[in-house]
Amino acid sequence: MKQYITLLSIILIITSCDVVEGPYMSDITIPIDTTTTDTTTNTYLQKILIEDFTGHKCPNCPDAAIELGEISAIYPGQIIGMAIHVGSFAKPTPIIGAPYDYDFRTNSGDLVDDAFGNISDALPRGMVNRAGYPEDSHKLGVGEWAATVANELTKDTTFTIDISSDESSISITSEVHKNINGDYNLVVCLTESNIINWQQDGGNSVEDYEHNHVLRTGLIDQELSISTNYVAGQEIENTITYDLIALEQSNKDYSISLGGNDIPGEWNPNNMSVVAYIYNTITKEIVQVEEAHLTN
């Protein structure tokens, strides 16, 4: 991997990383439909996945993490974040022990980036339930996330997801809450929070930045049911076995294949979560998502 001289790095930051102008949640007021956000009365809670495409060398990307936190505060218990490190700003420094030598990239994240039109071309960007695909309006600037979340929360809850797991297996129970017909897939991923490592934040290099809900790996992306007819009250069971050590090694191997440093490891199971979501295979829109601690 080539070393970038300081001038080239500055040019890349100016030309490739979006300057985020907002508005942010702190700048605007989004009307809240209390019929969809009142967690005490809504038995079947609709939840939203925000996929935050980011990179540790992207100076504006911490603003996206702040916005995600502010949206989550507005809709407690309904927002699930996933930080996907992709693109040129996610490349690690080739010298081990130097700042930014850690590799947050994953094969799963790169596949999502490719499938949805290289969102990494201009960071920070994100998808909210992947709404707007394939008309290209799914690639959202940070200031567009809140309004899209508010719109997604007005939609009917068709599924809920329950997750239980131990050190070697994950059980997913998907319950149908509305008679529907269609093709749906179930995706299960692992994320990790409380990762302390380098992050460019504006003009500052922050050594002890806290990276949260970082995508570590995808486990499955498969049809939810062989039938396309779903009946209210129906429950669908899926069990996934996993080997965390093997998955971690696979991530290291992927880093090496990209010219990385073989150090995207040291996963901490105590800080890891299972994220499961159901999406429509035609529209690609996510209709429900859930998150639970890895070994709950």
Image (tube, rainbow, N blue to C red):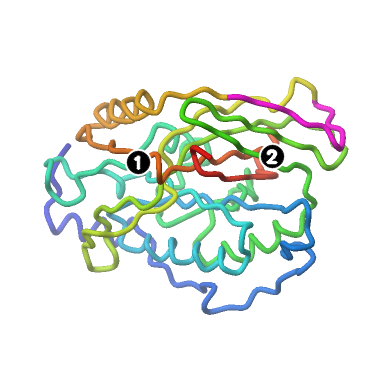
| Depth order, front residue of 69/119 | 69
User: Residue 180's quadrant in the figure?
Assistant: top right
Q: Is residue 95 magenta?
A: no
Q: Is residue 79 left or right of residue 57?
A: right
Instruction: Specify the amino acid type for callout 2.
Output: Thr
| Depth order, front residue of 81/257 | 81
Residue beneath disc 1:
268
| Depth order, front residue of 43/84 | 43
Q: Position of residue 287 (x, y in %)?
A: 70, 44
Residue beneath disc 2:
283
Look at 35% across and 26% down and name the residue there: 245
Q: Position of residue 239 (x, y in %)?
A: 61, 24
Q: Position of residue 49 (x, y in %)?
A: 58, 50
Instruction: Specify the amino acid type for callout 1.
Output: Asn
- Judge whether 2 appears above or below 13 on screen: above
Look at 14% across and 59% down and name the residue there: 7
- Judge whether 225 appears above or below 19 on screen: above
Give the mark nearest the N terminus, 2 or 1. Answer: 1
Cα distance in 3D space between marks 2 and 1: 35 Å
Which range of residues does the magenta coloring cover?
228-239
Helix, strand or loop under label 2: loop
Q: Position of residue 75 (x, y in %)?
A: 63, 64
